[in-house]
Amino acid sequence: MTAQTDPKGAGLPAGLDQQESREWMDALSAVIDREGADYAHKLIEDLLEHARQNSVDMPFSANTGYVNTIEVDQEAKCPGNLEIEGRLRAYMRWNAMAMVVKANRLHPADGGDLGGHIGSFASLANMFAAGFNHFWHAENENHGGDCLYIQGHVSPGIYARAYLEGRISEEQLLNFRQEVDGKGLSSYPHPKLMPDFWQFPTVSMGLGPLMAIYQARFLKYLHARGIANTENRKVWVFCGDGEMDEVESLGAIGLAAREKLDNLVFVINCNLQRLDGPVRGNGKIIQELEGEFRGSGWNVIKLIWGKGWDELLAKDKDGVLKKIMMECNDGDYQAMKANDGAYVRQHFFGRDPRALKMVEHMSDDEIWNLRRGGHDSQKVYAAFKEANTAQGQPTVLLVKTVKGFGMGKIGEGKNNVHQTKKLSDEDIKAFRDRFNIPIPDSQIADIPFYKPADDTPEMKYLHERRKALGGYLPHRRQEADEKFTAPALDTFKAILEPTPEGREISTTQAYVRFLTQLLRDKNIGPRVVPILVDEARTFGMEGLFRQIGIYNPAGQQYTPVDKDQVMYYREDKAGQILQEGINEAGGMSSWIAAATSYSHSNRVMIPFYVYYSMFGFQRIGDLAWAAGDLQARGFLLGGTSGRTTLNGEGLQHEDGHSHILANTIPNCVTYDPTFAHEVAVIMQDGLRRMVQNQENIFYYITLLNENYPMPGLEAGTEEQILKGMYMVKPGQKVPDSGLRVQLLGSGTILRESFFAQELLEKDWGVAADVWSCPSFNELTREGQDVDRFNMLHPLEAAKVPFVAQQLAAHPGPVVASTDYMKAYAEQIRPYMPKGRTYKVLGTDGFGRSDFRSKLREHFEINRHYIVIAALRGLADEGKINATTVAEAIKKYGINTDKINPLHA
């Protein structure tokens, strides 16, 4: 057979018998009519496999034609009143526009530019109407509530709906993006800023899709473990087609298919535009995404064309219209909607005389009114209905729209529509006319909000629809109804006591013992969610595999290779561990889902996510910030932390800055404990605050893999541990020299201060008190609070920072040494007692591999450098001669000419 085509064969290869082809088609049609589509699908799959086995080249394609997935005769009919819905939608469009334009007109003295977006909601309005009116359940006694990940830039439209519902006042609309005085509305979905309204933050693009997948999986997890009935709940995720270029957006779609998350629906708004221009000017983003999702195992529903195209497609016997639809690229489609009907006639239908003839009876206006599928309420409803009832697979809706729909010449389909937020009175008048808003010309300059009377059919319909779905959305629960009491500290007595003579453990082992003990608690134990990213054995947690099992919705359908071992790899449908594989972003997303369960599922859960600290606030920092916005509650454990502690892993793994990054999140409480008892005190208090008191905080605790003896808890130091500083090893009471210094440290480097204490006393006659500082960050925050109070209350007695209180009765220079950058301990410099010298040692610079002793020498944080810093402090205060410092440098063999490790 030649590669040529038969001009009479509608594109079929030359020589192909059309009658035979038609007979095959008729036979398939008969099978579909008689046996149904599923049977026909199986038959086709069998034929394709038979062809492959007989050496017929059958390349895989995940794409279908550039037409709607749902045939006209298969569309579910919308049961609602589409006319009323259209009027309500118009009012919401108007109020959303008015809100943004007002915000950018009213304050010229402040630049008159608060930002905001009109074009995104303009393209999505029909889809939100369908969801809010017919599909999305609020939490009530009969339903756990659906989870809505709302595209961030459409927030004005969501506020506009809530205004009509009476949940947001006109005063709030007038204060859009003006939040400082407490009356405003946040720019985007932020649970922190509107804690009873927004469910999830989404405007950090890519994070919404990623978090939503793990949220849907966590709902399945809750159900499988018998903690909550979530079988009728859905997670709806709205994304822009441009947003899908973020690697996180598509990064976990394989998980969603693998775990058959049929409670998950992605709605991708394919308006073909991102912020600056086309998403795929030379391609077709809908076809590209269809291949990505269908190839990953998703149910794909394309909604491309509105009902006006149905009649034309029905007449398209030669397939010419479908051919043009496929040939046009997205840049062409954008240009068509940025122009007019005459342009579409010429540049779309004009590509083939047969297509041009199909529309010869239509005016340019009629051609212009051939809408895309996302602006057809009936077709949107049908697509949503199909997605809402799909089983066994996650569903993605690829919905074609026009960015700035209804904005006319000021922005519809234009490259600058995303930034359009200031309209002239003429533009506003045109917008009013387009959507038939009852605002007279005399009021156009004021851009008044419009709200029908409560007894109008529109308002009755609005409330009736939400009543039928259980209440109003979005809505966020701020606390769980259920209450728990944290175990008392003495529950963890074994971790609080000194280690026996000759025994050494690490703080990582202390954490595992704490977790193991907590799991035994009959009340709280079942609510613990251990999360791993393929590092259980690294952190000594493999014993949990058999004890509580690894969650897998399919159970364990194989015999594990280590079945004969006590700690074998056990997967279970009701397993408690979430094992995410080598996937820090996935682990963090699972942690977020568990850490916010009190809000989205009215269930208190306690997630513990342990990972290499370097891959914490550095690698998934944006997700950690989102967790702060979400008011997450749980424990993040940065294992083998410190730049010199994970000694063989070099530059990639060695962490000297995660605490600095963690401190940028206001509701993240951070600790770098040295001892097992500190771990127990900190984590027990975390349970009290987050679980018992339901405080909106989460913890970041760094752990070590270095073994050493543990001194045990000294009664009465608990509060000081939590505040961040307590004396752990006092020096000589009265040295002969009368000289004294204060040594501060955290993590494993605190132990270098112990050795420095001995050297100072033995070699130089200087007494040294050693302080454990589990949190320089908490000390800093307390000091900042004190500073602020003193500045704003000049007539009241000044408060004293906790650092100064602790050091007040303990004289001498202060030296801090940690396994983190100098900036970590430098933070407390302003809170030192007046006149005290403060020296800071830290691990600034890139990490490298070597023995710990060599690394600590390289970064100048070991015992010898602590001694030299202490002596230099005494010299600076005039208490010893500088020659003593020089003697120490010589005695300890310090190379003063070596390159600063910051630059090495």
Image: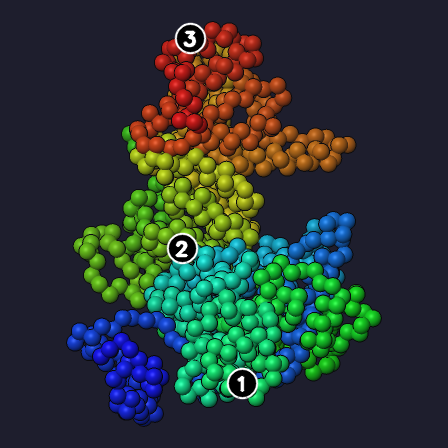
Q: Answer with mark 1 or mark 2, whichever residue precedes in sequence.
A: 1
> On the picture, is 646 further left or further right than 147?
left
Residue lying furthest right in this view?
A: 442
**Number of marks in the rendered image:** 3
Other-residue count near label 3 (Cα within 10 Å), few / some / many at <14 / 14–19 / ≥20: few
* Rendered residue at 58%/19% (across/down): 836
> Looking at the rendering, in which quadrant would you find the N terminus?
bottom left
> On the picture, is 41 further left or further right than 136?
left
> Looking at the rendering, in which quadrant would you find the C terminus?
top left
Q: Which residue is mark 1?
A: 359
Residue 164 appears anywhere in the view: no
Instruction: Measure how far apart labels 3 and 1 are at the Cα level.
Output: 97 Å
Residue 397 at x, y = what percent?
46, 72
Q: Is 17 drawn above or below residue 264 in the view shown?
A: below
Q: Which residue is mark 3?
A: 887
Callout 3 secondary element: helix
Q: Answer with mark 3 or mark 1, whichever residue precedes in sequence.
A: 1
Identity of the amino acid at label 2?
Gly
Residue 748 at x, y = what percent?
39, 31
* Rendered residue at 26%/63% (across/down): 556
Question: Which label lies toward us, 1 or 2?
Answer: 1
Q: Which residue is mark 2?
A: 586
Residue 564 at x, y = what percent?
18, 54
Q: Answer with mark 2 or mark 3, whichever residue precedes in sequence.
A: 2
Q: Which mark is residue 474?
A: none
Identity of the amino acid at label 3?
Glu
CB atoms of marks 1 and 2 within 8 Å: no
